[in-house]
Image (cartoon, grey):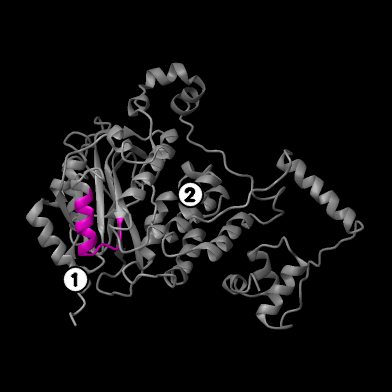
């Protein structure tokens, strides 16, 4: 019986075969191709008003102590690309084919999209051969680069011309990437079922060539040049119609033209410099005095619907709900990190562990640009269905008033809530949570935990008991 090939042996076999077919490039050559000379800002020269490459890496407070606390740090890379040196050999360093204004990788700071990167996981030798066969026979569009990331590939489609990242373009660009992911990750190119695909947005960061793969220091992320740069029109020809993006030329609207066509937007965003976003009114009138109601509700939905293929998007959505609810960044980071052990327990394939590093990278979504992220988009990303409120056409405030009136009438206008809950220590935690929920059907996880003086994880554990 033949010995099973190890992940590290598989990594080397992939590299050897790809080297025989394509050109291996250095990290500098790869990023110079993504961001051509002159496309980024110049260090120390503020007169050059251009965006920059930004990557995120994890750093230990005590580099010699493997158990020391890890935190995320952003590094700005200018047009000379000298800043890339800091990512060489890094344990975890990620970026996206996006240039940014400012100092952080946020959607609000995003300036140009230079390409799409598809994360293809579960790639053995057979799957790699099938991937190459589909590329060579025009089943799939020819990628510009294949990146050996350890357990799988990062498939890069670089664009001949960058797309300006106006807010209204985020959704159609994400839709196109969704369509590309569906065709690239198929039953032949991955040993993970297509139903478990991981759909990621255009701002998703990926391990950088030259940094470590998940296999360790001796197994760096390696880039191979496969084909030429492409266009939106070319990519449209391969994906289903529902994922098509219309003519990219429509999106290159000069600012002077936008001033004429969208005067209100121009006055608010350009003249007044107002970058604020309308957020949901969560506290007070609708959810009582609990500003965490919707946020806690999403954590409960995650507990019911998270699986191996949607965990990153579940955390990214938790972050967007925190934005919607005006919840402090430190709180959501703490909550997200506390969820890591449970999310990792859902791992079906040992090569696809969920770690704290995934949480730090998901914080790209902690940005006001996601304050109005739609239910439809959340469902598409997480595959978790969200039941819509049915108000028969009434405004939410009117509907709440009506429901409160009906409830009071049905209960004889009595104070039907038992605000004290069950006495501490009466019954097991399971019994107490079940009883409290029965008496207080509208109570949130936080309210129950405070009333029963138990932890929120305990409430989650017995939420459906």
Label 1 Cα neighbours within 10 Å, binned few <14 / some 14-19 / many ≥20:
some
- Give percent across and percent down for residue 141: 25, 43
Farthest residue in the left direction?
Answer: 20
- Give percent across and percent down for residue 244: 38, 36
Q: Are marks 1 and 2 in contact (CB under 8 Å)?
A: no
Tell me the quarter of the picture where residue 197 sits.
bottom left
Tell me the quarter of the picture where residue 170 sits.
top left
Viewer-side residue, 35 vs 154: 154
- Give percent across and percent down for residue 386: 59, 53
Q: Is residue 247 above or below residue 57?
A: above
- Give percent across and percent down for residue 283: 66, 50
User: Which residue shows up at 70% across the image and 62% down it?
Assistant: 443
User: Which residue shows up at 78% across the image and 70% down it?
Assistant: 420
Residue 380 badge: 2
Range of residues picked out in magenta: 120-134
Q: Is residue 463 left or right of residue 2?
A: right
Q: Is residue 427 left or right of residue 47?
A: right
Q: Which residue is mark 1?
A: 8
Q: CA distance from mark 1 to mark 2?
A: 34 Å
User: In terms of secondary structure, where does tag 2 sit?
Assistant: helix
Q: Is residue 236 above or below residue 155?
A: above
């Amino acid at each position: 019986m033949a010995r099973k090939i190890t992940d590290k042996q598989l990594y080397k076999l992939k590299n050897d075969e790809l080297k025989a077919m394509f050109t291996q490039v250095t990290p500098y050559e790869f990023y110079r191709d993504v961001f051509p000379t002159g496309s980024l800002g110049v260090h120390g020269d503020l007169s050059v008003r251009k965006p920059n490459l930004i990557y995120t890496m994890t750093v230990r407070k005590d580099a010699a102590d493997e158990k020391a606390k890890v935190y995320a740090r952003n590094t700005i890379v200018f047009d000379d690309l000298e800043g890339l040196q800091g990512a060489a050999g890094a344990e975890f360093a990620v970026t996206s084919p996006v240039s940014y204004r400012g100092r952080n990788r946020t959607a609000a700071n995003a300036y140009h999209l230079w390409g799409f990167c598809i994360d293809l996981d579960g790639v053995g030798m057979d799957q790699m051969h099938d991937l190459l066969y589909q590329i060579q026979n025009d089943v799939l569009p020819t990628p510009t680069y294949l990146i050996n990331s350890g357990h799988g590939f990062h498939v890069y489609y670089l664009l001949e011309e960058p797309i300006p990242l106006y807010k209204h373009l985020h959704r159609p660009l994400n839709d196109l990437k969704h369509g590309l992911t569906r065709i690239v990750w198929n039953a032949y190119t991955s040993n993970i079922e297509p139903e478990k695909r991981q759909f990621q947005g255009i701002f998703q960061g990926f391990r950088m060539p030259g940094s470590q793969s998940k296999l360790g220091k001796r197994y760096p992320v390696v880039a191979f040049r496969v084909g030429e740069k492409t266009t939106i029109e070319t990519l449209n020809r391969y994906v289903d119609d529902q994922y098509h993006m219309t003519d990219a030329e429509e999106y290159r609207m000069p600012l002077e033209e936008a001033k004429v066509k969208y005067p209100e937007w121009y006055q608010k965003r350009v003249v007044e410099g107002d970058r604020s976003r309308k957020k949901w009114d969560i506290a007070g009138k609708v959810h009582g005095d609990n500003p965490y109601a919707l946020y806690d509700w999403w954590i409960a939905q995650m507990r019911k619907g998270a699986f191996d293929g949607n965990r990153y998007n579940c955390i990214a959505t938790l972050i967007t709900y925190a934005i919607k609810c005006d919840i402090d960044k430190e709180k959501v980071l703490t909550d997200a990190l506390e969820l890591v052990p449970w999310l990792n327990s859902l791992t079906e394939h040992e090569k696809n562990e969920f770690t704290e590093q995934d949480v730090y990278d998901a914080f790209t979504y902690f940005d006001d640009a996601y304050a109005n992220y739609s239910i439809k988009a959340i469902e598409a990303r997480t595959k978790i269905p969200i039941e819509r409120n049915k108000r028969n056409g009434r405004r939410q405030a009117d509907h709440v008033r009506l429901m409160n009136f009906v409830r009071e009438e049905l209960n004889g206008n009595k104070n039907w809530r038992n605000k004290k809950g069950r006495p501490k220590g009466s019954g097991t935690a399971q019994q107490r949570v079940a009883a409290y929920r029965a008496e207080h059907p509208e109570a949130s996880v936080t309210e129950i935990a405070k009333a029963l003086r138990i932890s929120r994880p305990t409430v989650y554990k017995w939420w459906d008991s």
